[in-house]
């Protein structure tokens, strides 16, 4: 049971600093990936390392990455029969940690690092399921409230799939950790919490005014 709940640490997923902040439980990793709107994928390009932002979605133990067929990682993956070696990261910033000294300023954050070989999704049925998951990742329920891609659009869209095998999370919580000799300094210290707050939905100018705002937007939140 423990093996099912935890990812096994590897040499690539154990941090070199602040190892006590590392988390390997699936609940923490899945929660961060599901809440984050954007991830970054790093891979080796022809001219050196490349890191690109993209939209993602997790389906069980597979992370899907959305992109154009003409984008660099998709082209590289198409020519990699054994998969494209990647490093995918996602980060949530929960607060600014303000210390009395510059040295101890920090952030409250939750992050995930996943490494492995990503494969290009070639099966159209799997690609459609992945794209539906990506759309629902942005706004839950949206995939059934919008038109799916036609054949031309599906052919122009690419998806990478990364099995979540080598994964770790890192979490930093709590206030500043000032040096004892700095505690009497007259500077404010503490945490400024940060959250992602949606505004009011703005309808398209060509939308029928009678069209109601769907509940998944009226009650939108990331969690």
Image (cartoon, rainbow, N blue to C red):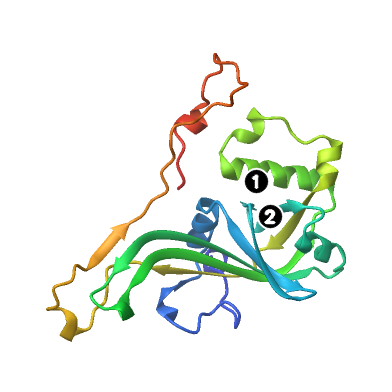
Image quadrant in which you'd find residue 184: bottom left
Question: Which class describes the residues within 10 Å of circle 2: few (<14), some (14-19), or many (20+)?
Answer: many
> In the image, is residue 144 above or below residue 96?
above
Q: Left or right? Give the position of 28 relative to 75.
A: left
Q: Residue furthest front?
A: 205
Name the N-terminal-most of marks 1 and 2: 2
Image quadrant in which you'd find residue 194: bottom left
Query: Horizontal and vertical percent for residue 212?
Result: 52, 19
Q: Left or right? Give the position of 200 relative to 59.
A: left
Q: Nearer the viewer, residue 71 or 205?
A: 205
Residue at 61% in and 41% down: 136
Query: Horizontal and vertical percent for residue 47?
Result: 77, 76
Disc sitting over residue 64 in the figure: 2
Disc sitting over residue 91 in the figure: none
Residue at 46% in and 59% down: 92
Q: Nearer the viewer, residue 208 or 164?
A: 208
Q: Which residue is mark 1?
A: 134
Image quadrant in which you'd find residue 77: bottom right
């Amino acid at each position: 049971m423990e093996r099912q709940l935890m990812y096994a640490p590897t040499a690539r997923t154990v941090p070199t600093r602040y190892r006590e902040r590392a988390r390997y439980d699936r609940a923490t990793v899945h929660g961060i990936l599901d809440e984050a709107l954007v991830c970054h994928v790093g891979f080796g390009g022809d001219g050196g390392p490349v890191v690109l932002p993209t939209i993602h979605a997790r389906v069980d133990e597979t992370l899907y990455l959305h992109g154009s067929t003409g984008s660099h990682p998709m082209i590289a993956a198409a020519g990699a029969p054994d998969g494209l070696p990647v490093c995918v990261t996602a980060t949530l910033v929960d607060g600014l940690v303000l210390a009395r000294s510059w040295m101890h300023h920090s952030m409250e954050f939750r992050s995930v690092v996943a490494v492995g070989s990503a494969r290009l999704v070639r099966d159209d049925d799997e690609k459609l399921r992945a794209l539906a998951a990506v759309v629902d990742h942005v706004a839950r329920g949206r995939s059934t409230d919008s038109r799916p891609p036609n054949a031309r659009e599906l052919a122009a869209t690419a998806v990478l799939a990364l099995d979540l095998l080598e994964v770790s999370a890192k979490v930093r919580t709590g206030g500043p950790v000032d040096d004892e000799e700095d505690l009497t300094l007259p500077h404010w210290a503490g945490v400024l919490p940060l959250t992602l707050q949606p505004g009011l939905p703005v309808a398209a100018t060509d939308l029928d005014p009678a069209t109601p705002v769907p509940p998944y937007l009226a009650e939108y939140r990331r969690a």
